[in-house]
Amino acid sequence: MNEDNKRYIEPDLASQLTPEPDADNGEGHGYEEADFTDTSYAEDPYSEPVAYDTSESDLTYEADQEMASQEEQDEWQQEMTTADEAVLEPEVVVAAPVGQEMPGGLPLQDRMIPRISIDAFCDDSDSGVVMQRVAADRRLNRAHVNIQMGGVEAALETYATASTPDLVLIEMFGERDKVLGDIDRLAEVCDAGTKVVVIGKINDIILYRELVQRGVSEYLVGPITVAQVIDTMSGLYADPDMAPIGRSIVFTGAKGGVGSSTLAHNVAWCVSERMKHDVTLIDLDLPFGTAGLDFNEDPTQGVAEALMDPERLDDQLLDRLLVKCSEHLSLFASPSSLERTYVMDTEAFDSILDTVRATVPCMIVDLPHIWEPWSRHILSTADEIVITATPDLASLRNTKNLMETLVQARQNDARPKLVINQLGIPKRPEIPAKDFAEAIGAEVDLILPFDPQLFGTAANNGQMIGEVKPESKAAQGFVDLAQRLTNREVAVKKQAGVTKFWSQLVGK
């Protein structure tokens, strides 16, 4: 939780919701900082492995087989077998169903809540706990949230002497007439422009219509969930004419030299070339970044120029700074120069990433192994995080620390994904993947074997693994990880044999 954007709750709420509330923070407003240490709801929802579905092609083969001669069948079967050989399972993939779903069954939108002030007035402790989790969510990083107990009476007392915020969420119990009467009383003290969301206990369409006629923005039937509240806020402030914000995927290493950059670059290539999905790769290792080398590019400008004056960055300037590596892949490269040092603040990085996300459906960030306020902020606000580690003690310790810190900071998100790289270096003692996973309390999503010949050739040629040896298990592991990170299907060329066979049947 950012120090400059703390959420506060009234002392009465703290005593009901947290067993040991924090001491007065000394800012003179009489509030206590909310305790967001409960992570019971943030357990990893991932459990089931991903399997390639070949049922459709099998059915197609059986239907066509009846119509073909034995010679044509043999030729077609050979072509299908050749195509299937290019789809190999990764070395180890402990994968999950794609997509992010919160408790309550609703998928969370990735759109950030703008810089607004929000007051929530709860009538029971369960709703208060939910609002605490909402306030701690990364999507509300820019908003200021104040939570109080007491429902409508507390709201009336507060706004009798104070102006109303941008958004009020208020819990109202009782039947239709009582709720309508309470909202009429609240309307007398609400300022123009304040949006109101009512949380009630009865599912009544007539009540909903009456509330909307009185200017209420939304009516939620309790018990509320974190996803429900955040989705409602996002809908209230989303611009329907604005394109969806791109997905932010951040790669970081448990320590230096574990191959996090290699992983980020190969996944970006897979998203663009295998899924035909637009993606921008941002290299934030300003003095030592390797994205330009790995893609055989030598950009003269890049992310450093944008960071120097982030307020000037718009779509036109961004187009000039990006390097177009392929039809779907753009590179926002680092200068990789030691001629100057870089001291940047969090807001500069935030502005740059927001601008990029608004122009592309997928943004992959190659984050260096560094722990500064700006790097921690980028990790905390990412849609997906991938931690790359090697099977040694230092990586184990650092991965465990990163997992614990990020799960606490991202309580409403799935855990970061874990990749163990360089497994099987000869004569090197290693921690088994199973023991590694048990020690950090999280499953391993992908294991990449030590293959210096393949990875060295790709690096020296400025190519990706999928270009050098697409049939390798490492290449297929990158494809599988990219698919799960982006929730998109891979365009596997398994229909070539079918197309040729049908062409023969129709005489074309």
Image (spheres, rainbow, N blue to C red):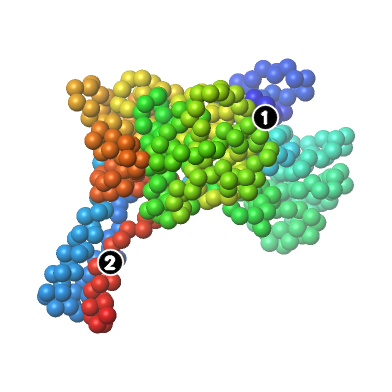
Q: In which quarter of the image is residue 60?
A: bottom left
- Helix, strand or loop under label 1: helix
Quote the CA–CA distance across marks 2 and 1. 55 Å
Can residue 75 be seen by looking at this rendering? yes
**Camera-nearest residue between 20 and 27:** 27
Residue at x 40% of width, y 24% of height = 255
* Residue hosting label 1: 5
- x, y (%) of residue 117? 74, 38
Q: In this view, does 138 lie to the left or right of 271?
A: right
**Camera-nearest residue between 335 and 209:** 335
First in sequence, mark 2 or 1: give its number.
1
In the image as oriented, which residue stretches furthest toward the bottom?
507
Residue at x 68% of width, y 38% of height = 311
Residue 213 vs 355, above or below: the answer is below
The total number of labels drawn is: 2
Q: Is residue 133 left or right of residue 118?
A: left
- Helix, strand or loop under label 2: helix
- x, y (%) of residue 461? 32, 40
* Residue hosting label 2: 496
**Camera-nearest residue between 46 and 41:** 46
Q: In the rendered structure, are the residues bearing label 2 and label 1 in contact, judged by CB atoms less than 8 Å apart?
A: no
Residue at x 63% of width, y 22% of height = 21
- x, y (%) of residue 22? 64, 20
Q: Residue 121 carries which label?
A: none
Residue at x 31% of width, y 47% of height = 466
Can residue 141 be seen by looking at this rendering? no
Disc 2 residue type (three-letter): Ala
Count neighbours of disc 2 (C-alpha within 10 A) and say few if under 14, some if 14 to 19, many if 20 or more: few
